[in-house]
Image (cartoon, rainbow, N blue to C red):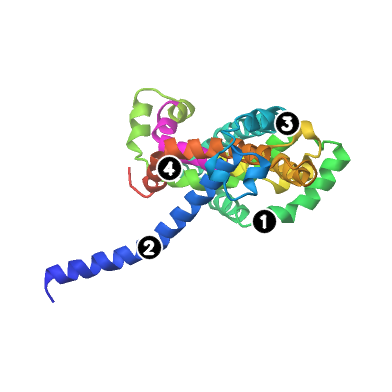
């Protein structure tokens, strides 16, 4: 068998492997496109055969109606607050913890690392009932601060475990040079080591942003009032109300509004996600 035939065979096998991916991408784009076009249509056009003809024009008022009447603005701002504060808190807690566990040897170091790894395997549903009992006794339900605290606490183990790989692969020469210049360990971390781990920080922030933005179960339990609900719970309630109002165009407009932040974030930072995932496997 010649080298050319071997190359052609490998190319053909690679092409077969891309077919399922191509089908999935087309299917996803068709679904997203349909939702977007539905958000610019009337309810009667959505259930007709000529939705894509836009005989009555583009109905951008669906977005205005969803933002104001359906209170998407409240849910959007709540989720934005929860996500930004929680992601920042996770970085501020997980990064120093991961740095200390990866660079210093002390009794219990391995135990702490194993505890963080074990925490990743605990399903959230297992701790919801005990948490709800404690929160109910303390009368902290429907509290924004509580939700931000829970989101932070639930994602810190993953943050520590993820950042450990980055700090372990950074060279010790940076710290040695900083020590020679008279830099304290704390200042070395904030000024030198943390910026060097920027690819990991960006990737971790993106993962946490998507996870917290789309979180549903915990917010359903601890946020029953409309003024504290995030977008996931608020959107579900809007879908339920569509049975009575019939404003399907406004509902799909709400879906697009909720979907856009994560979509834009991934479009502009997809390269950083890939670099952040692969950088942890490269020795510094």
Which circle, 1 or 2, is nearer the viewer? 2
Q: Earlier in the sequence, mark 3 or mark 1?
A: 3
Q: Earlier in the sequence, mark 3 or mark 2?
A: 2
Residue 134 in the figure: left or right of residue 276:
right
Q: Where is residue 126? Give x, y as percent.
A: 73, 56
Give the farthest residue toward the top. 182
Tell me the SS state at disc 2. Answer: helix
As measured in the structure, the alpha-carbon distance from the residue carrying label 4 to the one carrying label 2 is 24 Å
Q: From the image, tell me which residue sits under label 2.
A: 19
**Quadrant assignment, res 67:** top right
Q: From the image, tell me which residue sits under label 3.
A: 71
Q: Is residue 193 above or below residue 119?
A: above
Label disc, if present, on residue 273 of the rendered structure: 4
Magenta region includes residue 192: yes
Depth check, front residue: 119 or 125: 125
Tell me the SS state at disc 3. Answer: loop
Q: Residue at x 43, y 25 (%)?
A: 191
As measured in the structure, the alpha-carbon distance from the residue carrying label 3 to the one carrying label 1 is 31 Å
Q: From the image, tell me which residue sits under label 1.
A: 123
Q: Residues within 10 Å of mark 1 (few under 14, many from 20)?
A: few
């Amino acid at each position: 068998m010649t080298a050319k035939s071997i190359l052609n065979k490998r190319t053909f096998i690679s092409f077969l492997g891309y077919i399922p991916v191509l089908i999935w991408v087309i299917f996803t784009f068709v679904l997203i496109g349909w939702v977007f076009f539905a958000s610019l249509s009337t309810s009667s056009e959505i259930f007709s055969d000529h939705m894509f003809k836009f005989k009555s024009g583009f109905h951008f008022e669906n977005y205005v109606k969803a933002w104001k009447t359906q209170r998407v603005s409240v849910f959007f701002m709540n989720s934005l607050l929860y996500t930004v504060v929680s992601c920042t808190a996770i970085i501020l807690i997980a990064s120093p913890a991961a740095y200390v566990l990866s660079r210093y040897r002390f009794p219990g170091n391995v135990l702490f690392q194993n505890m963080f790894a074990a925490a990743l395997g605990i399903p959230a549903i297992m701790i919801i009932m005990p948490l709800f009992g404690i929160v109910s006794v303390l009368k902290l339900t429907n509290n924004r601060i509580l939700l931000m605290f829970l989101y932070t606490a639930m994602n810190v183990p993953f943050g520590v475990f993820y950042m450990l790989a980055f700090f372990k692969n950074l060279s010790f020469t940076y710290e040695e040079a900083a020590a020679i210049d008279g830099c304290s360990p704390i200042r070395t971390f904030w000024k030198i080591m943390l910026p060097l781990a920027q690819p990991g920080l960006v990737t971790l922030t993106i993962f946490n942003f998507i996870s917290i933005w789309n979180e549903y179960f915990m917010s359903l339990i601890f946020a029953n009032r409309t003024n504290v609900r995030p977008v996931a719970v608020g959107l579900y309630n809007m879908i339920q109300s569509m049975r009575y109002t019939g404003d399907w165009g406004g509902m799909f407009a709400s879906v697009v509004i909720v979907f856009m932040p994560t979509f834009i974030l991934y479009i502009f930072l997809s390269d950083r996600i890939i670099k952040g995932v692969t950088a942890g496997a490269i020795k510094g």
